[in-house]
Image (cartoon, rainbow, N blue to C red):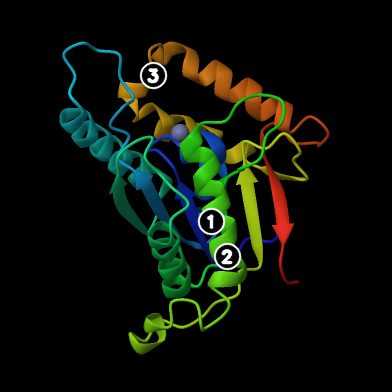
Amino acid sequence: MDTPNKFLVVTPHPDDAEIGCGGTIARWIIEGSQGVLLVCTNGDKGSSDPDMTSEKLAGIRAKEQANASKLLGLNEVIYFKYPDGELDESSEFRERIVKNIRKYQPEVVLCTDPIRQSFYIHRDHRVTGQVVLDAVYPYSRDRLYYPHHEEEGILTHKVKDVLFWGSENPNEVIDITQYIDIKIDALKQHASQLSNMSSVDGWIKSSACRSAAENKYEYGESFRRITFRP
Ligand SMILES: [Zn+2]
């Protein structure tokens, strides 16, 4: 697919976006695209350390996400700061997504696939994917959803494509061969989530290699693409 002028990434937790689409983000930014990241939760449950608190962990993960986003070259990062595991398909959450889609007017929105049959999916990933899909269509498009946005000067927007990462039925692969090192470096910023730092290069490269399998390039990221308009 063509590199978009603007894209929006919606990640349930700090670190999901680097795993799912870090190479694509790096590639599109280097190719001149504008990219914004929405981080839905503060990731305050992701630790088995008996001395860790949710408050302390949220602070660590925000710093890790800021460092990773800088390496990827993202233009802006927005933190919704919901507690980890507490996302709901609420109108309030949907509105926050819709408002940012309308504000930034991205051609492409990337997020987690809400549907998977073969193995269980984290609740936050499922909820985020579904709310983002609903936010794209029809809520962002139609002016009578959240009509106060118009009064604030934030106008409706039609997204062209949604790319779901973590899909069991991908239909789009993006060549990230030249950007694999940026993806790995960005992921390594999330040190609190990586019990074995020395294994990261290996599993990221083998996964990217599997995604690229049917293509001539070495590393790819695969997505389920839904096109709303040409
Ligand atoms: Zn996650």
User: How far apart, in angstroms, are the residues tagged by discs 1 and 3?
Assistant: 27 Å
Q: Secondary structure at mark 2?
A: helix
Rendered location of residue 175, percent (x, y): 68, 43
User: How far apart, in angstroms, are the residues tagged by discs 3 and 2?
Assistant: 32 Å
Rendered location of residue 137, percent (x, y): 62, 67
On residue 114, which mark appears?
A: none
Rendered location of residue 117, percent (x, y): 71, 31
Q: Secondary structure at mark 3?
A: loop
Q: Earlier in the sequence, mark 3 or mark 2?
A: 2
Label 2: few (<14), some (14–19) or many (≥20) C-alpha neighbours in 10 Å: many
Check the picture and name the quadrant holding the C terminus. Answer: bottom right
Classify residue 196 by image quadrant: top left
On residue 132, which mark appears?
A: 1
Circles 1 and 3: CB atoms closer than 8 Å: no
Name the residue type under label 3. Leu
**Residue 1 shows in this picture:** no
In front: 83, or 201? 83
Circles 2 and 1: CB atoms closer than 8 Å: yes
Name the residue located 73 percent from the left edge and 71 percent from the top edge: 229
Q: Is residue 178 left or right of residue 18?
A: right
Look at mark 2 in the image and give the residue it sits on. 136
Name the residue type under label 1. Val
Classify residue 146 by image quadrant: bottom left
Q: Is residue 79 left or right of residue 225?
A: left
Name the residue located 45 percent from the left edge and 60 percent from the top edge: 94
Name the residue type under label 2. Val
In front: 100, or 134? 134
Identify whether 204 is placed above or below 145: above
Look at mark 3 in the image and give the residue it sits on. 194
Identify whether 136 is placed above or below 148: above
